[in-house]
Image: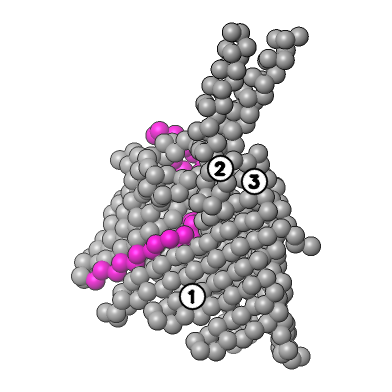
Amino acid sequence: MKKIIFATPVIVIIAFVFTLFVSCQKIDTNKLAGDWKVVSLSRTYEYKNQKYETTFDGSIKTVTHTVTDSVISVPNPTPHDSTITYIKTQTYTGEITTDYHRKGSYVYSETFKNDDTGVSETIQAEGYWFFTDANHDSGYGLDDLLAMQVSKLTYNTNYGTIHTTIYQGENTLDIYEISTLTNSKVVLKMNKAETINFILYVTTMEYTLEPR
Amino acid sequence: MKRAKKYLLLLICGILTMPLLNSCKVGDEDSDFTFYTRKVRLCQDWSFSYYKHSVQHNDTITSNEYDGSSYISVFGNKSYVSSATMRISFNKKGTYTWDEYISNDTSVYTYKEEGYWFFTGGGDDSDTQFKELLALQKTAHTKTTQIGGTTTTDNYSASGNLETTVYKLIKLAKDEVKMESKSEKQYIQGGVTVLDIVTTVINLKMGAK
């Protein structure tokens, strides 16, 4: 009987300490850390009659802008409506890299040269990355989403123009779904649809990272 | 002697537990100890006891401030006072609802926002702990403004991996929440340095009905 009386507070303390471990759990932030390069990327952005498509295979980036006008009256020989589609395609050569540091910061770099004009563009973003906690209704668990918070964004071209924007504080987070996360491959997705005053804007994006 | 050993053991257990209690403190004004998880503390129906949202563009500031009953909008040297209620509810399954009702002699404004909430943060470089940041991912809003006999409505609905707004949780208690978001953006436009500062302070108290 005495043993039971003595064991009770010990069990209570052990259980208490265990719950503290659970409630204070920290996620493993080392999973994503590393220096990565983008080996493939596919992105589309659509609204109304406009569509922007970007593909990247690790060195060549192709950007296509498509505009579809669907109400063109053609009088002869029989009056009818027609559709005209404008397509503009540009190609670039370059690379995209992201270095996720173990302590929670990252550096994103994008360097491309327009194959037609020869103009070079560099985009560099610095910021912080986080995993988000689980959310039952959205269907995502711990570590399923990657949140990226930019703190500095620099854009420059070989024309000598440099645009730098510095962010400080709790600004917005860009959210990516982590589709694959291994030591040799990371696949991130960002799919979203927004209806703003009855106009639908749709973005789909998927890119694959491999170690540099 | 045996009894002394037992008490010594209990004392050691207690001492071992103390650093764990402190490690649970996340926000600056969080209590050192609570039995409630951060999720349990957040997921309730709240009334706003204070709210301030200000936007500064260089030297020009516009702001909206709410003290629990009055809503004051300031544009330059003009201010407008309305009566208002502001509430927010966080659901344990991960959704939230934000409601505003603001009225005065000439207009009525209603706002309803819905979305998902996430705890996030962490990492030495960001100077935040995991679950110190609260991310609100808006999936819908409806704004309605009635002025005279005219009603205008603004609708937004969305799904997927949407951009989120993020707040730093200063205090997360069972009966009070304090959070704020301050973001500065500095850039050069036409050879001139531009500074934009957006600040939001939210204090919540129990008791939304």
Q: Residue at x 64, y 72 (%)?
A: B67
Residue A39 in sight in this render: no
Residue B32 — which label? 2
Residue at mark 3 shares a chain with residue at mark 2: yes
The chain to which mark 3 is attached is B
Start-end of magenta stretch? A161-188
Residue A164 counted in the magenta span: yes
Q: Main secondary structure of the magenta part?
A: strand
Residue B39 — which label? 3
Residue to which mark 1 is pinned = B55
Residue B98 — which label? none
Q: Amino acid at mark 1?
A: Val
Mark 1 or mark 2: whose residue is earlier in sequence:
2
- Relative placement, left or right, of A71 versus A120 is right
- Relative placement, left or right, of B140 versus B181 is right
Q: CA distance from mark 1 to mark 3?
A: 30 Å
Q: Amino acid at mark 2?
A: Asp
The kind of secondary structure element at disc 1 is strand
Q: Residue at x 60, y 69 (%)?
A: B51
A33 w.r.t. A172: above or below: above
